[in-house]
């Protein structure tokens, strides 16, 4: 029997939800013949083994809800449940309990009502008579299944509860966003609070007696570390290796620990070491489970797909299926900001392909970035079992946007600010990348220069204000005046100059102004378009109809001066726009980034709107046909710039008419990124788009007679709530969070009836938002308070 897991089966059946981005959120794998899955497509499915070699499974819908499911639990056959039962919960705030094998349209055995927010986690007691549920409302209930009543409440949680583990017939553990693990008895008595995690705790697995770790259970979460504990809270070890949030843990019959993460991997751990890393072609691996009968493992991912892996060659897929899975992994594009955890990515310092033969990894799953001979960057993971580096994808960076980088201490940054601390002394340097949180950058700067943390909020807010396209809250008639800039001049910040400026005292809702995103160096972007054009011509076989002529290049070069001279309306010409649209929509996708970036800059101009929307279709239709907003592209930056283009349409009256008329189509294109943004830049662009639409709806009714403003506002509010509730680590930027909240709050000013109808759903969303890293930013706290005031 092979020591390594290999792909056994690929299960497809969960459908796309309203966000067009289904996630398989929870899985249980109780027997070799059956597993259950819960998804954002609002279903729980039963998968039944129909053929053993290779394994084939058929699915049936066990439970159909009105909203997505997050939590799933199973109890084996008993007197009450002859074939077993499943429990599921999620956005509807109900716990559904259903007999296994009952028809999809049959009523649930029980529907338990009591939670005030999204249910995140569920577990049956060992005898199957009770269910423990936790959720965003910070509540954990113990339910009697037959009575349908709450027999105990596990109290004391200071934030949403993400995980529960029934340890034995008497005790249960909870994982909380307040960084605490709590141990209770099933009667509700608090037995212990365990501290040690430095961020949100999400998941557990029970460790068997006699385990190599000596631990009773393992926990993991946002701090990217698996921690091992005894029941009295004694730490027994840490497992390091994951490079993003850890979402799920499981235990194999032989004691190996299995984990799944936002870093695209499932990892297997033994004797304190990672012994295998299984990379997936998906952004997030939300759930992992182990079959106690076979020792096979199953993962559920953000790409809708369930994958089973086995160590037994008898249950492994055929060689061609395994090859296709590996090839899909190799073709996966990895955004640079994800690959390098938001740190500066220095291509010129990377080793060449020869390093794959000369360097030896220190641990399974270790990353190595290689600068290929063609200039591209590839990512590789070390495999201990094969003693080689395995290609997992191509790293795509945002440099195609034409951003002008600045060097500091040998590294490149988007910004390097001067900070005046004391008169007569040279300013300190504050390097900052747009992919990181302004709060993290501020903290790092203060700690490095041994400055008091009393400046923390001021510096963070100043960074945010000086790195966004438009200051939110300005009306079109309120352009910032340099003379009244409280931060001084020349992009310098002097701590203490505006100590009381963080809170202006002015109401933020409703927002009245539209914002734009005008980022990137035009000359760099035009140069990259020319480089791509010549590369395509040199490769041969390219369609002459998509090639650019010398006249096209000359027209594009003229754009540089137009954009630099008049960024708010560069007055693009028909030839310039035609050339850019050709490159944006018909070139190979990896070559389109710079062209889409410049096109986004031009969208602020009325002439751009007139030229691109005067025929049978608008620019929104052109983007749709070009596929630049499709998810899981070779580069995530195409979608970033396409979203910025949609944002910038709101800069002109004619652009707002297009945005108004294409409301449904625009939101349909943007919606997949609301549930799982692929980068901080995507999150910020989407936040800006939603804010602009909220301002539009608050300022005027839509043009179509068949659609009311309130109807559109409800659709937009659902998308806004989805973005606020997404769990991606890319959604941590305080400035972007502020924009989304301003969009939500602006919609609430549409009227009392609208507010009353939306109140219950929004309250749960706000509770969750309060746990985000950016929620402590002053302007975020202020706008959240205004929203709560609107809801009263």
Image: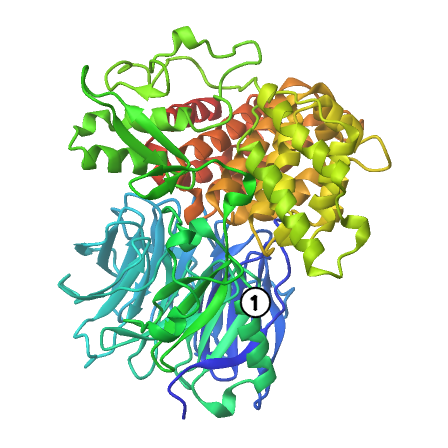
Along the viewing direction, whichever of 707 and 310 lies nearer the viewer: 310
Regarding mark 1 in the picture, which secondary structure is present there?
loop
Count of marks, rendered view: 1
Query: In this figure, which residue is indicated by the disc labeled 1?
Result: 305
Instruction: Tell which of 248 and 144 is nearer to you.
Output: 248
The residue that appears at 61% across and 70% down in the rendered structure is 12
Q: Nearer the viewer, residue 111 or 506?
A: 506
Residue extending furthest toward the top: 483
Considering only vertical position in the picture, is 293 above or below 383? below
Q: Quadrant of the C terminus?
A: top left
Q: How is the image coloured?
A: rainbow
The answer to whether residue 789 is above or below residue 93 is: above
Looking at the picture, how far across and down is residue 275, in whole percent?
32, 77
The x, y position of residue 250, in whole percent, is 36, 71
Q: Position of residue 314 (x, y in %)?
A: 50, 92
**Position of 324 compared to 264: left or right?**
right
Image: 296 above or below 169: below
Residue 752 seen from this side: yes
Q: Quadrant of residue 665?
A: top right
- Residue 8 image position (x, y, % from top left): 52, 82
Residue 99 seen in the figure: no
In the image: residue 157, left or right of residue 76:
left
Quadrant in which the N terminus appears: bottom left
Q: Classify residue 535 as left or right of residue 524.
A: right
Q: Callout 1: 10 Å neighbours few (<14), some, many (20+)? A: some
Q: With 153 as the anchor, is 658 left or right in this view?
A: right
């Amino acid at each position: 029997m092979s020591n390594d897991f290999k792909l056994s089966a690929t299960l497809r059946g969960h459908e796309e939800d309203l966000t067009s981005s289904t996630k398989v959120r929870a899985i249980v794998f109780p027997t070799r013949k059956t597993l259950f899955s819960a998804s954002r497509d609002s279903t729980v499915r039963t998968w039944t083994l129909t053929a053993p070699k290779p394994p084939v499974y058929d699915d049936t819908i066990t439970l159909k809800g009105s909203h997505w499911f997050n939590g799933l639990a199973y109890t084996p056959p008993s007197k009450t449940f002859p074939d077993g039962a499943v429990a599921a919960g999620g956005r509807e705030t109900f716990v559904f309990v259903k007999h296994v094998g009952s028809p999809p349209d049959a009523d649930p055995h029980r529907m338990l009502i009591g939670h005030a927010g999204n249910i995140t986690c569920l577990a049956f007691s060992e005898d199957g008579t009770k269910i423990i549920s936790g959720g965003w409302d910070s509540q954990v209930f113990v339910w009697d299944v037959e009575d349908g009543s709450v027999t105990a409440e596990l109290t004391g949680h200071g934030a949403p509860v993400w995980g529960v583990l029934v340890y034995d017939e008497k005790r249960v553990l909870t994982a909380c966003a307040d960084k605490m693990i709590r141990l209770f008895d099933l009667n509700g008595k608090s037995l212990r609070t365990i501290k040690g995690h430095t961020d949100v705790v999400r998941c557990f697995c029970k460790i068997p007696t006699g385990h190599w770790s000596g631990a009773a259970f393992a926990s993991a979460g946002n701090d990217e570390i698996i921690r091992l504990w005894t029941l009295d809270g004694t730490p027994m070890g840490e497992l390091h290796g994951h490079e993003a949030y850890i979402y799920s843990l499981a235990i194999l019959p032989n004691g190996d620990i299995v984990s799944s993460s936002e870093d695209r991997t499932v990892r297997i751990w033994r004797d304190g070491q990672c012994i295998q890393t299984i990379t997936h072609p998906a952004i997030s691996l939300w759930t992992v489970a182990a079959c106690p009968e076979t020792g096979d493992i199953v993962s559920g991912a953000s790409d809708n797909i369930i994958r089973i892996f086995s160590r037994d060659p008898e249950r492994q897929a055929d060689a061609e299926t395994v090859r296709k899975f590996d090839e899909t992994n190799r073709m996966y594009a990895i955004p640079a900001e994800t690959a390098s955890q938001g740190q500066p990515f220095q291509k010129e310092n990377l080793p060449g392909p020869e390093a794959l033969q000369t360097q030896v990894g220190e641990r399974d799953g270790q990353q190595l970035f290689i600068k290929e001979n063609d200039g591209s960057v590839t990512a590789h993971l070390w495999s201990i079992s094969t003693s080689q580096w395995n290609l997992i994808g191509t790293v795509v960076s945002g440099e195609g946007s034409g951003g002008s980088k600045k060097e500091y201490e040998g590294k490149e940054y988007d910004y390097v600010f001067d900070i005046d601390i004391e008169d007569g002394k040279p300013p300190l340097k504050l390097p900052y990348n747009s992919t990181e949180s302004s709060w993290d950058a501020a903290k790092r700067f203060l700690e490095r220069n041994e400055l008091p943390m009393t400046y923390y909020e001021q510096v963070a807010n100043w960074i945010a204000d000086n790195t966004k396209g438009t200051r939110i809250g300005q009306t079109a008639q309120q352009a910032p005046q340099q003379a009244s800039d409280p931060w001084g001049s020349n992009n310098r910040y002097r701590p203490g100059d505006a100590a009381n400026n963080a809170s202006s005292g002015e109401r933020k809702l409703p927002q009245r102004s539209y914002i734009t995103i005008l980022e990137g160096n035009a000359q760099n972007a035009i140069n990259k378009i020319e480089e791509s054009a010549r590369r395509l011509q040199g490769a041969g076989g390219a369609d002459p109809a998509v090639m650019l002529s010398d006249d096209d290049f000359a027209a594009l070069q003229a754009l540089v001066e137009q954009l630099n001279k008049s960024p708010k309306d560069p007055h693009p010409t028909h030839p310039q726009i035609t050339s850019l649209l050709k490159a944006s929509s018909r070139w190979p996708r990896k070559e389109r980034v710079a062209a889409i970036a410049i096109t986004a800059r031009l969208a602020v101009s009325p002439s751009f709107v007139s030229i691109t929307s005067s025929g049978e279709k608008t620019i929104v239709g052109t983007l749709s046909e070009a596929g630049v907003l499709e998810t899981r592209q070779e580069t995530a930056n195409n979608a970033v710039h396409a979203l910025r283009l949609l944002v910038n349409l709101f800069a002109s009256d004619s652009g707002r008419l297009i945005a108004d008329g294409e409301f449904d189509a625009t939101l349909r294109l943007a919606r997949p990124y609301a549930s799982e943004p692929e980068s901080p830049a995507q999150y910020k662009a989407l936040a800006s788009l939603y804010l602009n639409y909220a301002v539009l709806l608050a300022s005027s009714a839509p043009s179509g007679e068949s659609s009311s403003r309130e109807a559109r506002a409800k659709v937009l509010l659902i998308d806004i709530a989805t973005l606020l509730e997404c769990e991606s680590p890319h959604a941590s930027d305080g400035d972007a969070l502020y924009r989304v909240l301003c969009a939500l709050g602006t919609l609430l000013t549409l009227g009392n009836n609208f507010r009353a109808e939306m109140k219950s759903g929004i309250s749960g969303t706000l509770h969750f938002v309060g746990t985000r890293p950016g929620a402590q930013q002053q302007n975020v706290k202020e706008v959240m308070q205004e929203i709560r005031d609107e809801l009263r």
